[in-house]
Image (tube, rainbow, N blue to C red):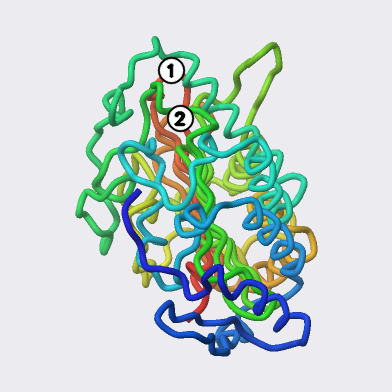
Amino acid sequence: MSSHTRPVLRRPVVLAACLSVALGTVGYLAFDPGSASATVAKQAVPASAARTGAGGANTAEVVKAADAFLATLSDEQKDAVLYDFDDEAKKTGWSNFPTPVVERNGLKLGDLTDAQDAAAMKVMEAALSKQGYEELVEIRKADDYLASLSDGEDTGDGASASPTATRTPPSGAPTDGATGGPGGPGGGGGGANFGSEWYYLSFFGQPSRTGEFTVQYGGHHAAYNITYAGNNVTMSPTLTAVEPEEFVLDDKAYAPLADKRAATIGAVQSLTADELAAAEIDGSFDDLYLGPGNDGPFPTEPEGVLVGSLTKKQQAKVTAMLRTWVDDLDEKAAARLLAKYVAEYDETYIGWSGGTTIDNDQTYVRLDGPSAWIEFSNQPGASTDEIHQHTIFRDETSDYGWE
């Protein structure tokens, strides 16, 4: 585990912090190990959160679950799981590659006791809706399935079987070859380092009902950056991916991302022939445009067709697509965020590249609004002969939280 900036809240002041919350103090305690006393530092909710957030977050429930998880940890484990909110590790510690290639932040779930692991998953269960949590569980099962295909040898980077097709990114796209981003290969390859035990949990900022903090959870094919600021929440960026689309593990059938696949293809195929022609995005994609390792800037010139110009029936298809990502969040906040994104259809575009069918390994679909950003990207299988899918959800007004 590489070192990281020590969090502002240290164990000697946990009791005092609890007392401050009970007394209604806004903020958290900053503790100087060299000082005999702790001082109270207010952490206000950013003005941008109040301006662009939709409210409705179940922050108290998530904080309760986070505190319960932290209570199971040793001092050393707390040091590993807690980061300053602005630590740059937040932006680099998630990927679609296995852990040996891109180191994750926080604690590896496979290294925890059963009780600690269960408490960690309770954090995600609180943060996500029933739908979202079930999807997370199924993505982890998909990684277990890929691990079962391995002959037991550690494949190291887990990406040797990854496709290396050349991408021609749209104008303005970064081309630095960063992992999983434009110019770089997609993640892939089965191996011993796949599996549900290779998922990690960390917190950026002390979990608080009144301050700003991020729950970061992820492994190979899922990465969640869920930030809370008072009663506002953003899940930007969130990566969900799978290979293969369907599989059987321990005599049970799974189909992670089935709703996202169906709704995305349904939305783009609802376009007329003329609209499809107008919606085609310049360039070709073998992975995500703004995926791991590439945090922007977002394109200044949207591509595709304006959702606001579509029929009500077509717009309903786009809303169904949006819903499959937004509804992964806790229900009340998700409903408010969805209403916000739908209200922006006069400035939102849907586009495609490569193909518009689910069985085409070149199919790429994008939704680009003032706030909501979604990418759905098919690519050839890396560990199997079947389709390998990556998706990303971002909110352009609250990526990694608010500033």
The location of residue 142, given as percent across then percent down, is 56, 27
The location of residue 5, given as percent across then percent down, is 37, 68
Residue 254 as seen in the image, left or right of residue 190: right
Q: Is residue 33 above or below residue 124?
A: below
The location of residue 403, given as percent across then percent down, is 47, 81
Residue 384: which disc? 1
Q: Is residue 72 above or below residue 380?
A: below
Q: Tell me what residue is drawn at x 46 percent, y 48 percent.
A: 352
Q: Can residue 393 be seen by looking at this rendering? A: no
Q: Can residue 176 be seen by looking at this rendering? A: yes
- Which amino acid, mark 2? His
The location of residue 314, given as percent across then percent down, is 68, 54
* Residue closest to the far front: 36
Quadrant of the rendered image containing residue 318: bottom right
Q: Is residue 367 above or below residue 161?
A: below
Q: How far, Cα to Cα, is label 1 from label 2?
A: 8 Å
Categorize mark 2 by other alpha carbons within 10 Å: few (<14), some (14-19), many (20+): many
Residue 299: which disc? none
Helix, strand or loop for disc 2: strand
Q: Tell me what residue is drawn at x 31 percent, y 28 percent.
A: 162
Q: Is residue 204 above or below residue 105?
A: below
- Which amino acid, mark 1? Thr
Helix, strand or loop for disc 1: loop
**Cβ–Cβ under 8 Å for marks 1 and 2:** yes
Residue 180 as seen in the image, left or right of residue 226: left
Residue 388: which disc? 2
Q: Tell me what residue is drawn at x 46 percent, y 13 percent.
A: 149
In front: 367, or 23? 23
In front: 281, or 319? 319
In front: 300, or 6? 6
Categorize mark 1 by other alpha carbons within 10 Å: few (<14), some (14-19), many (20+): some
